[in-house]
Amino acid sequence: MSYSIKDFLKGQGIENAELKKKFFSLLVDLGLCSTAFYLILSLILKKNTYCLLVYVAMFLFLMVLYFVGRFNDTVFMQKRLYFVYCFFMGNVFLPSLYLLGGGIHSGLPLFFMVAGITTILMLDNLLMVIMLLLNFISSMAAFKIDQTHPGLVDSFTQLGDATYIDIGISSIIAGIGIGFFLRHLTKYFDKNQRKASELLNKIEDASKKDPLCGAYNRRYLMEFLGGCIEKVEKGEMETFSIIMFDIDHFKKINDTYGHLTGDDCIKSLTYIFKRSVRNIDIVCRYGGEEFICVLPTAEDTPAFRRAEQIRASVENTQLSTEIDKKVTISGGVAMYRPGMTPEEIIKEADSNLYLAKENGRNQIVWHNGGIPPLCYATYSSDILNPVQNSGRRFSDVTT
């Protein structure tokens, strides 16, 4: 399956109006410069008066296009200018210059190729087909006249040894024009490729994030946990821990203050989480009012300390101006052990979170296999019942 440049641009989802405008501006600028140069060259080579008149007419034609394009750059006007340019250059000026400037013995046949490329790039669909057909008829008619009436063409010009100069200069000008266009085309593709890459990165990043609060979503959480497990198995990391948090009485907050206030709580809570963890840690919204923080390289003891710091920070922060009471969270900590799956470590953290809820909320539980035997007696009563134990939190407990 073959693709034109237009198909490629459309396939990339890139609007090609900007490229057409730049290309048209380049064509007019080069046309003005080359026409002025050919006027001088025609005088030096002593070409006939008719040829000079065509160059003058073409120069004035390009000047009109230049100023109209500069002062009226609407899409509608630009499309009209493209059509007028392709029609007159391919069907009037080039065939006339071909016959008056030396025919097949001059360098002008090269510009028929440029005219065809220009038509394909500048016009769309049916207009492009019609213009190409007209260009073909015009060029074939010029070639046929040159073939059947060589004396007529030769009578207009006697280039002699200057033929090689004419062909050489024409080749250089045509090459410069194509070269500049390809240079612009390459820059345009590079620019849009960067834009496309940035857009894809944004889309990929958005696919990993929760749209409400900006925390990572459950899908990315499972991918990240799988990556952590793989690193542990390869010996690149000793272990890791997770903390599952849940907003206490969140349904009551939604019912009392409304879902928008509940959303504000989730956003504020996400901000506290992100501010409280390390750069290598991630914060995920697991679902509803549940969050999971993954702490690579962290064992359960430092993970518990971090969870307790976050819990205390939330307790002392007003998550929403609409709520006149403190909002608290509960949490459960779990550390990865060899052979565990992402689902199993999440289940363990969820079980500990459930214990925290059952035991009065606003606390962190680290229990099922998470507390070293020597620490269990020290931590269990203070951690599971922080309010009942003289209001002490983790910061009051010594290890």
Image: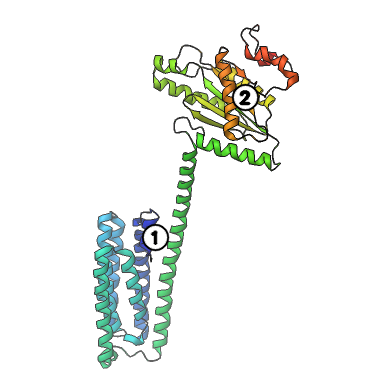
Q: Can residue 57 be seen in this view?
A: no
Tell me the CA gap for discs 1 and 2.
52 Å
Q: In this view, does 329 lie above or below 335?
A: above
Q: Which of 150 and 341 lies nearest the eye of the viewer?
A: 341
Determine whether the residue tagged by mark 2 lies in a helix, strand or loop.
Answer: strand
Q: Which of 278 and 145 lies nearest the eye of the viewer?
A: 278
Determine whether the residue tagged by mark 1 lies in a helix, strand or loop.
Answer: helix
- Sort mark 2 into few (<14), some (14-19) or many (20+) by Cα contacts within 10 Å: many
Report whether 89 appears left or right of 270.
left
- Sort mark 1 into few (<14), some (14-19) or many (20+) by Cα contacts within 10 Å: few
Q: Is residue 27 above or below residue 161?
A: above
- Which numbered disc flags the more N-terminal residue, 1 or 2? 1
Q: Which residue is drawn at 55% across and 36% down?
A: 222
Q: Position of residue 379 (x, y in %)?
A: 69, 16
Q: Which residue is drawn at 58% across and 34% down?
A: 342
Report whether 381 appears left or right of 144.
right
Residue marked by disc 2: 333
Q: In this view, does 156 lie above or below 177?
A: below
Residue marked by disc 1: 8
Q: Is residue 132 visible?
A: yes
Q: Spot the residue most to the front.
A: 339
Q: Which of 104 and 165 lies nearest the eye of the viewer?
A: 104
Q: Spot the residue most to the bottom.
A: 151
Q: Where is residue 136 in the image (x, y as percent from the top left)?
A: 27, 77
Identify residue type, mark 1: Phe
Q: Quadrant of the C terminus?
A: top right
Question: For residue 280, what is the image quadrant?
Answer: top right
Q: Position of residue 382 (x, y in %)?
A: 67, 12
Q: Quadrant of the N terminus?
A: bottom left
Q: Residue at x 37, y 65 (%)?
A: 4
Between marks 1 and 2 in the image, the one whose residue lies nearer the viewer: 2
